[in-house]
């Protein structure tokens, strides 16, 4: 299912949000700061990081729900956005191919629309149904696809539990037969037992429909489970990107390492033996990130070099990219 | 026998809402000794927070205790008046809430909020209270305590606020600390810091801790004993090793199986627990887990399972053990 064709590609993507001030004092939240990656057709790229690291913004900017500050977005060989060449195409035809599932199933469904209307809205917008009965059949088909049934079509969102609402959100994304879905923390708000149901569904859908995912989450275990490759973000930048098993077993960046060691293991014997690599302090503000390497304020290996220069994302072994000046010392 | 620090027997608690009676707790019993760390795990709505709040008498209207007894440190909590409860809260038992963003008062300084507890429960002078507050901030690992005492909650990050909450909770050296999802709102690296801090403090101060969480990873590293709750019932109770390595209830087994493994080289498909959580307005008549259980039998749907003791420290409420019991009994009979 995984091919070597790049479906989505972003280069030097930047997204700054204004954060007060006027003229020269104008300040910006540097939510995404020079991020580049690509996603092969049929694969799942996971994106992890702590809150405020910019992972959600990457997903939304990639779909141009936000207008990027700088950079270039390519989808299936076509340039959707290029700041330098001032290209910004009309996204409407691409919305049929690129969809999103949001994090909070309680906030992302309109409480005054029935499930049929929520799922059917995009069918209407893109004129995918020729008749009312065809529209109805399509909606029922979609609901059944995500494990709900026709009885649910005329109900309202408040009548559903969190797991069911997330299924509705997925049915809505599937309504236009997309090729690519940004999954923005789709299981974070769910209980463990329900989370497993939804994760399995994402995997089944990918197999059957040949979907490509950008899977964003803060829970590394879930991302590891579903992704082929994983990118780790810290304060607006990708610090490490690798094949998912490679990333977990041979992580190279000090941030990735402490992130992995901080995850509580659900196994008492391993948990007792597990040595954490503690990180001091908190994440700095993205309004005023540290110079050079953004991680240097919490990094045990940091020195003057890290403050002076931003480490580039270098390929250390096939497909394993790391942004760190001191890889030799870290390992 | 020495009296346990906390003993809850057959606690029943309901919320009487306009839509009907929500049966939050349906006969919860457990006990906790001094210096023990108990983890309560379960999904949202399983009653884990309500159980802990009731120890402090914090289940206000429309919640009502309709049966059972709660004994804590020589008090009978279910019979105490509000005035007596106020004397106990913060001094003998205190709580850390889930969301450090909303559980501190935004219009008082950090110093004010720590000293409030000391003012209520001790007869320290103003300067003594100030010094004690400073000491507490140092204890929870906050730098420059003198400066921090004068600051307001919004000047602190989530992890820092949770440290302040812990400092407030520990101000009077309580015998029992209830931590209600203390790290759920925090990032993993900050979570690791807070858990480490709680373990250190426990070693230093020797209090008991009840740790409420939905994260099995957190209990695995923190707790000695675990109670698994489902739909207002404790379905299994045991030591951490027993719960993880010899789970005695189908729900516990399902929970453990449904967590993705981080280190596995080959990815296996997750095994979810099918079905939806229980509606507490009308919980199932028999075993609460029966509608989602793959080994459900006729008896499970009609009658509540009795307790089965699997070891001195491990018990489970499941009919499957009883069936085994019955079969075993039958073969014994044939042999004799």
Image: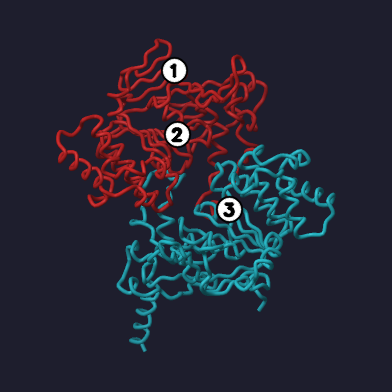
Q: Residues within 10 Å of mark 2 (few under 14, many from 20)?
A: many
The chain painted red is A
Q: Tell me if label 1 and label 3 are in contact, CB under 8 Å.
A: no
The answer to which image quadrant residue B109 occupies is top right
Task: Judge whether B47 appears above or below A227 on screen.
Answer: below
Task: Judge whether B12 appears above or below A179 on screen.
Answer: below
Pick the front one: A26 or A182: A26
- Label 3 marks a residue whose chain is A
Q: Using the image, tell me which numbered label, if any, was put on residue A47.
A: 2
N-terminal-most mark, 2 or 1: 2
> What element does badge 1 sit on?
strand
Q: Residues within 10 Å of mark 3 (few under 14, many from 20)?
A: few
Which residue sits furthest top? A85
| Residue B269 seen from this side | no
Q: Tell me if label 2 and label 3 are in contact, CB under 8 Å.
A: no
Residue A80 x, y percent position in the rendering? 35, 19
Q: Which residue is mark 1?
A: A71
> What element does badge 3 sit on?
helix
Pick the front one: B265 or B5: B5
The chain painted cyan is B
């Amino acid at each position: 299912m995984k091919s070597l064709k790049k479906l989505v590609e972003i280069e030097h993507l930047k997204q700054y949000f204004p954060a007060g001030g006027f003229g020269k004092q104008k300040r910006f939240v540097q939510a995404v700061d020079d991020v580049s990656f690509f996603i092969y057709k049929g694969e799942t790229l996971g994106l992890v990081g702590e809150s405020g690291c910019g992972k959600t913004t990457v997903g939304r900017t990639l779909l141009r729900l936000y207008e990027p500050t700088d950079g270039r977005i390519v989808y299936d060989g076509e340039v959707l956005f290029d700041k330098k060449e001032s290209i910004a195409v009309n996204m409407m035809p691409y919305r049929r191919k690129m969809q999103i599932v949001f994090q909070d199933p309680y906030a992302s469904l309109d409480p005054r629309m029935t499930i049929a209307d929520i799922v059917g809205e995009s069918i209407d917008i893109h004129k995918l149904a020729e008749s009312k009965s065809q529209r109805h059949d399509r909606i029922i088909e979609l609901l059944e696809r995500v494990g709900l049934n026709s009885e649910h079509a005329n109900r309202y969102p408040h009548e559903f539990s969190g797991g069911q609402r997330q299924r509705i959100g997925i049915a809505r994304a599937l309504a236009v037969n997309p090729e690519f879905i940004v999954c923005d923390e789709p299981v974070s708000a769910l209980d463990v037992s329900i989370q497993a149901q939804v994760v399995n569904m994402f995997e089944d859908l990918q197999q059957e429909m040949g979907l490509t995912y950008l899977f964003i989450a803060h829970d590394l275990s879930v991302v590891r489970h579903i992704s082929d490759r994983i990118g780790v973000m810290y304060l607006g930048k990708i610090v490490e990107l690798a094949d998912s098993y490679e990333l977990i077993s041979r992580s190279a960046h000090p941030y990735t390492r402490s992130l992995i060691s901080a995850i509580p293991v659900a196994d008492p014997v391993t948990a007792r033996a597990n040595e954490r690599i503690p990180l001091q302090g908190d994440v700095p503000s993205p309004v005023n990130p540290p110079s050079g390497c953004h991680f240097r304020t919490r990094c045990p290996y940091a020195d003057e070099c890290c403050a002076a220069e931003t480490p580039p994302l270098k390929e250390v072994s096939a497909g394993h990219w790391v942004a760190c000046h001191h890889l030799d010392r870290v390992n | 026998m020495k009296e346990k620090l906390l003993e809850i027997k057959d606690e029943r608690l309901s919320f009487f809402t306009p839509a009907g009676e929500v049966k939050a707790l349906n006969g919860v019993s457990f006990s906790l000794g001094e210096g023990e760390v108990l983890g309560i795990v379960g999904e949202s709505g399983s009653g884990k927070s309500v159980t802990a709040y009731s120890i402090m008498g914090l289940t206000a209207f429309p919640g009502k205790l309709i049966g059972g007894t709660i004994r804590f440190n020589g008090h009978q909590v279910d019979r105490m008046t509000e005035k007596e409860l106020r004397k106990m809260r913060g001094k003998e038992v205190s709580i850390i809430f889930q969301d450090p963003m909303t559980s501190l008062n935004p219009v008082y300084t950090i110093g004010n909020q720590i000293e409030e507890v000391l003012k209520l429960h001790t007869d320290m002078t103003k300067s003594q209270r100030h010094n004690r507050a400073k000491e507490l901030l140092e204890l929870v690992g906050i730098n420059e305590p003198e400066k921090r005492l004068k600051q307001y909650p919004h000047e602190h990050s989530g992890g820092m606020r949770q440290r302040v909450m812990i400092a407030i909770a520990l101000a009077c050296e309580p015998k029992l600390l209830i931590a209600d999802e203390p790290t759920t709102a925090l990032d993993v690296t900050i979570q690791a810091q807070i858990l480490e801090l709680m373990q250190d403090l426990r070693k230093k101060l020797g209090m008991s801790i009840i740790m409420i969480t939905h994260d099995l990873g957190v209990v695995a590293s923190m707790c000695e004993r675990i109670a698994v709750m489902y739909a207002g019932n404790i379905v299994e109770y045991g030591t951490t090793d027993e719960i993880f390595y010899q789970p005695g209830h189908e729900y516990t087994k399902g929970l453990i199986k449904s967590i993705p493994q981080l280190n596995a080289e080959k990815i296996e498909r997750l095994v979810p627990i099918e079905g939806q959580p229980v509606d507490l307005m009308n919980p199932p008549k028999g075993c609460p887990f029966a509608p989602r259980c793959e080994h459900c039998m006729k008896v499970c749907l009609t009658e509540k399972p009795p307790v089965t003791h699997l070891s001195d420290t491990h018990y489970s409420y499941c009919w499957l053990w009883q069936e085994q019991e019955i079969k075993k009994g039958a073969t014994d009979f044939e042999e004799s």
